[in-house]
Amino acid sequence: MSNERVAGVGDVPEGEVRVVTCAAGRSLAVSNIDGTLYAIDNICTHDGGPLGEGRLRNGRVICPRHGAAFDARTGKVLTLPAVKSVHAYPVTVDGDDVLVDCEGAEA
């Protein structure tokens, strides 16, 4: 497991989603659900939209382009027009640091 600092805890307010980047250039959407942080791929499987620029509603990340929804915890696709899920990544908080295992994608 290779944890990498991608943000500070205050960078992702509760009820919001933000775009972060791993050192290798992988773009992730980090969500704060009731004080717990989750990370999924930042690319909608429908047309490549930036999930981290969407909204977080009831644990779902809503793509800003066409409204496809993904579970912010698991990356599972929840609504059309997307039909394929995205990867989720383990997140750890150490003090003020948000650490993501950028290589540890969970299908």
Image (tube, rainbow, N blue to C red):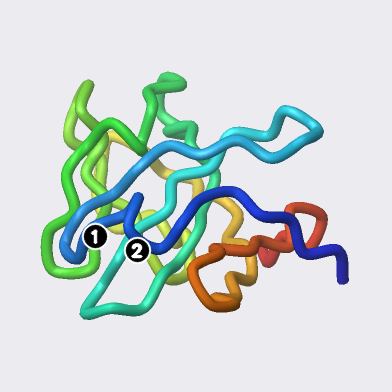
Please tell me how crowded label 1 is: few (under 14), some (14-19), or many (20+) other residues with Cα within 10 Å: many
* The image quarter in which residue 59 lies: bottom left
Give me the C-alpha separation between circle 2 and circle 1.
5 Å
Q: Earlier in the sequence, mark 2 or mark 1?
A: 1
Residue 87: percent from the left, percent from the top? 60, 54
Please state which of residues 92 and 28 is positioned toward the viewer in this rendering. 92
Asked which secondary structure carries label 1, the reply is: strand
Q: Is residue 68 left or right of residue 42?
A: left
Q: Quadrant of residue 27?
A: top right
Which type of secondary structure does the marked residue at label 2 adopt? strand
Q: Is residue 96 above or below residue 21?
A: below
Which label sits on residue 42? none
Measured along the vertical axis of the image, is residue 6 above or below residue 73? above
Q: Quadrant of residue 5?
A: bottom right
On the image, numbered disc 2 is attached to which residue? 71
> Which one is in front, 19 or 47?
19
Percent coordinates x, y for residue 92 in the rendering: 60, 76
Relative placement, left or right, of 35 versus 102 is left
Q: Please tell me how many numbered marks the rendered image carries.
A: 2
Q: Which corner quadrant holds the C terminus? A: bottom right
Residue at the image position 77 percent from the left and 64 percent from the top: 3
- Estimate the x, y position of residue 31 in percent, counting from the top left: 34, 58
CB atoms at circles 2 and 1 under 8 Å apart?
yes
Task: Left or right? Give the position of 23 relative to 95.
Answer: right
Kind of residue at disc 2 = Asp
Q: Which mark is residue 60?
A: 1
| Residue under the point 17% across and 44% down | 55
Q: Is residue 93 above or below residue 44?
A: below
Residue placed at 26% from the left, 72% from the top? 33
